[in-house]
Structure formats: structure tokens, C-alpha cells
Image: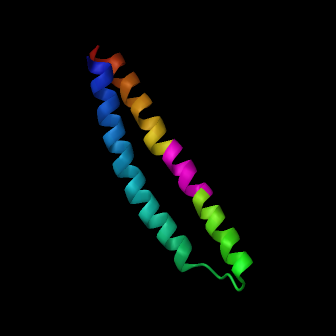
């Protein structure tokens, strides 16, 4: 039971971490946007979407796995 519980805790922590990191990083990127044309703005937003997807995979995707492994190793 420790593995699934660790995965749930890892998911919650990963979700929290994603929300905090994406707010700070993406907010800073949007403030420093120096796009002049609509094409540059679209490219900049596309890169932000890619960054957001990477953050989702790294935090929400990886943390439950890590939580499962830690819970299973330490407590189960």
C-alpha cells in the first residue's frame, strides 16, 4: 500500500510544483518578450507551449513514479 500512497503524494507534490514553476518561469518569459511582429510573437508562444509540456512531463509525470519508488523502497 505504500507504493500507491507514495504515487498519490508524488502526484500532488508534482502538481503543486508545476503550478508554482510555470507561474514564475512563464510569467518571467512573457514579461521579457521582445517580439516585434505577429510571426515572432507566435513563435515565442509556441516555445512557451513546448516549455509548458516539458514542465508537465518532468513534474506531474515524474513525481508520482518517484513517489511510488520511494514509498515502496522505504515503507513497503
The answer to which image quadrant residue 68 occupies is top left
Q: Residue 8, how many percent across, how many down?
A: 31, 32
Q: Is residue 53 magenta?
A: yes
Q: Residue 20, how many percent across, how many down?
A: 38, 58
Q: Residue 23, how many percent across, how many down?
A: 42, 64
Q: Is residue 42 magenta?
A: no
In the visual, does 40 lie left or right of 21? right
Name of the residue lying farthest toward the top: 76
- The stretch in magenta equals 50-57
- Give the dominant element type of the magenta stretch: helix, strand or loop: helix
Residue appearing at x 51%, y 43% in the figure: 58
Residue 49, placed above or below residue 66: below
Q: Quadrant of the N terminus?
A: top left
Name of the residue lying farthest toward the bottom: 36
Q: Quadrant of the C terminus?
A: top left
The answer to which image quadrant residue 63 occupies is top left
Q: Residue 6, how many percent across, how many down?
A: 31, 28
Residue appearing at x 38%, y 51% in the figure: 17
Amino acid at each position: 500500500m505504500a507504493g500507491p500512497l507514495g504515487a498519490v503524494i508524488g502526484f500532488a507534490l508534482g502538481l503543486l510544483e508545476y503550478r508554482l514553476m510555470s507561474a514564475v518561469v512563464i510569467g518571467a518569459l512573457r514579461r521579457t518578450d521582445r517580439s516585434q511582429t505577429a510571426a515572432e510573437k507566435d513563435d515565442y508562444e509556441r516555445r512557451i507551449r513546448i516549455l509548458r509540456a516539458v514542465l508537465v512531463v518532468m513534474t506531474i509525470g515524474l513525481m508520482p513514479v518517484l513517489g511510488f519508488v520511494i514509498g515502496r523502497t522505504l515503507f513497503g
